[in-house]
Amino acid sequence: MSRTPHAHQARHRAVVIGASMAGLSATAVLASRFDTVVVVERDAMAGHPADRKGVPQGRHAHGLLPSGLARLEGWFPGLTAEMVAAGAHLVDIGEAVWHQGGYRRRFPTGIRAPLASRALLEHQVRRRALALPNVTLRAAGVTGLTTSTDGVTVTGVTLDDGSTLAADLVVDTSGRQGRSLLWLAELGYEAPPVSEVRIDVAYASRVYHRDPAQVTEWEFALVLAGPPTGRQGVAFPLEGDRWMVTLAGMHGERPPTDEAGFLAFARALPSTEIADVIESARPAGPIVTHRLPSNQRRHVERLRRVPGGLVMLGDAVCSFNPTYGQGMTTAALQAEALGRALDTVGTLDSRLVKAAYRRLARAVSPAWQMTTGADFSLPATHGPKAPGTDLLNRYMPHVFRAAQMSDKVSLRVVEVTTLLRPAPTLLTPAMMVAVFRGSRQVRRQAAAPVTAEAAVGAAPVHVGDIH
Ligand SMILES: Cc1cc2nc3c(=O)[nH]c(=O)nc-3n(C[C@H](O)[C@H](O)[C@H](O)COP(=O)(O)OP(=O)(O)OC[C@H]3O[C@@H](n4cnc5c(N)ncnc54)[C@H](O)[C@@H]3O)c2cc1C
């Protein structure tokens, strides 16, 4: 439960740098706690869903996890329905085709996520955030920070038109390449320690036309080759009768960008759904690429000296291997954590900033541990490794195997990977019994592997039915 202090330092204006998913989540949280919020974004914003320069990753598959959707829906009631009305497909994640050494058992779980282009997801959230009565968008680039003469408080930002914008709190959500650390260094502040887990992820994506009359018995397909290769692919329907197909490789494996190579990469995956889409559908655009060298976490919670009035949030704090689809959700969780810090600390000085960073770290840690832990299942991954990671990575193949026949394990895999439950819930005694029993059974049946059809559960199972 949050504790409301008796008196707050004046909260007239908050300035948010960047109108991407972290910035919009932060805006939602700040709008109910400040008189006004000004979102400063250097990209021109179209009045409709559109890719843009400041978010180059937006041209690739973007999954919004249920816990991220729940936060956004809480701030913007009716948002999910609006996304669906705009063409998003709301799917039950339990029903997804998910191949990881075999087909995970499929059944309805009630855990839903919207499938749409990143441009549409962001557009819908932006529309709602900017419709808040005390929120305005300023089309400008932020070029620096203004501070009090003693340098202990950030008092606003400077803009590329030469003007300044005063703020009681600046929230930097300008992304992984955000420059506020540089600006702080110029003011004599230390940089936070950084954890870097190197993965060298390469994406190649293409949008295809989708015949609405064509029936597939799945709406979302995720195919992972598993260790030692990090090859994988995903296909799902987008708004406007289109498919999104994204292929990914790690540690030097790059999905080709020529037609034949793109298809061959998909065909080499251990199941056929994605290659079948590529082969049967008409391209609606070029093959585009993106690379990310590492999971990167800036340990802002370990900073000893911070100025008041500035909080970094979103990818600026932690950016993950995108194949786990956690960035937008973790940005929402961080924004929620900032809100809690604002509700418990009455000032906006360094006490607030440090309290916010402690909470942000707690919001980020589960996703960081899960993502980097899974990445260490590939021998080429290197960087700081949490204790117990190798042991867990010896256990996980049993989990994925058991998930091919056990609804209980399959559901838990969905819950953990979508951040609805913490990873240690895979290690309870009851779960371990189910995992090893299921794994043994699947091994015994290895001569007759499970097909996509056989992986569909006979009877609907709901989250509440499984303990
Ligand atoms: C290839 C790829 C695929 C991904 N897939 C997923 C996925 O499936 N699911 C998921 O949840 N996440 C995914 N992510 C991560 C997700 O895109 C980010 O976590 C999410 O956008 C939140 O980032 P952010 O808002 O902190 O920063 P960004 O999205 O990087 O946005 C930064 C914003 O700040 C603006 N900006 C920058 N500098 C300035 C300045 N000086 N002045 C004004 N504005 C400025 C930029 O224009 C931009 O709008 C993926 C990432 C990549 C790279």
Image (cartoon, rainbow, N blue to C red):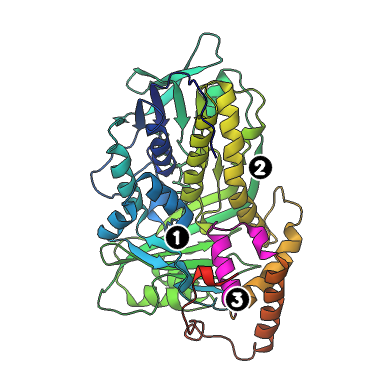
How far apart marks 1 and 2 lie (CA) works out to: 26 Å
Name the quarter where the C terminus is drawn: bottom right
Residue position marked by numbered label 2 in the rendering? 195
Residue found farthest to the top: 149
Residue type at mark 2?
Ser
Instruction: Give the mark nearer the N terminus: 1 vs 2.
Output: 2
Q: Say which residue label 1 marks.
A: 204
Name the residue that disc number 3 marks. Answer: 101
Pointer 1 with pointer 2, Cβ within 8 A = no
Instruction: Single out the mark in the foreground, 3 or 1.
Output: 3
Q: Going from the N terminus, do you reach mark 3 or mark 1 first?
A: 3
**Which quarter is ligand 1 in?**
top left
Quadrant for the N terminus in the image: top right
Q: Determine whether the beta carbon of the residue marked 2 sits less than 8 angstroms from the nearest atom of ligand 1.
A: no
Query: Do the numbered discs 2 and 3 sit on residues whose CB atoms are within 8 Å?
Result: no
- At horizontal 35% and vertical 52% (from top left) the residue drawn is 121
Instruction: Name the residue located 62 percent from the left edge and 35 percent from the top edge.
Output: 358
Determine if the C-beta at disc 3 is less than 8 A from ligand 1. no
What numbered label is drawn on residue 351? none
> In the image, is 354 to the left or to the right of 34?
right
Residue 107 placement, left or right of 131:
right
The disc labelled 1 sits on which kind of residue?
Ala
Name the outermost residue toward the left.
Answer: 47
Q: Which residues are magenta?
A: 406-427
First along the sequence among labels 2 and 3: 3
Q: Residue drawn at (51%, 78%), measured in percent from left and top?
A: 271
> Is 425 included in the stretch rendered in magenta?
yes
Q: Tell me if residue 263 is in the magenta stretch.
A: no
Give the main secondary structure of the magenta stretch: helix
In the image, 49 versus 59, the foreground residue is 49
Question: For numbered disc 1, what is the local secondary structure?
Answer: strand
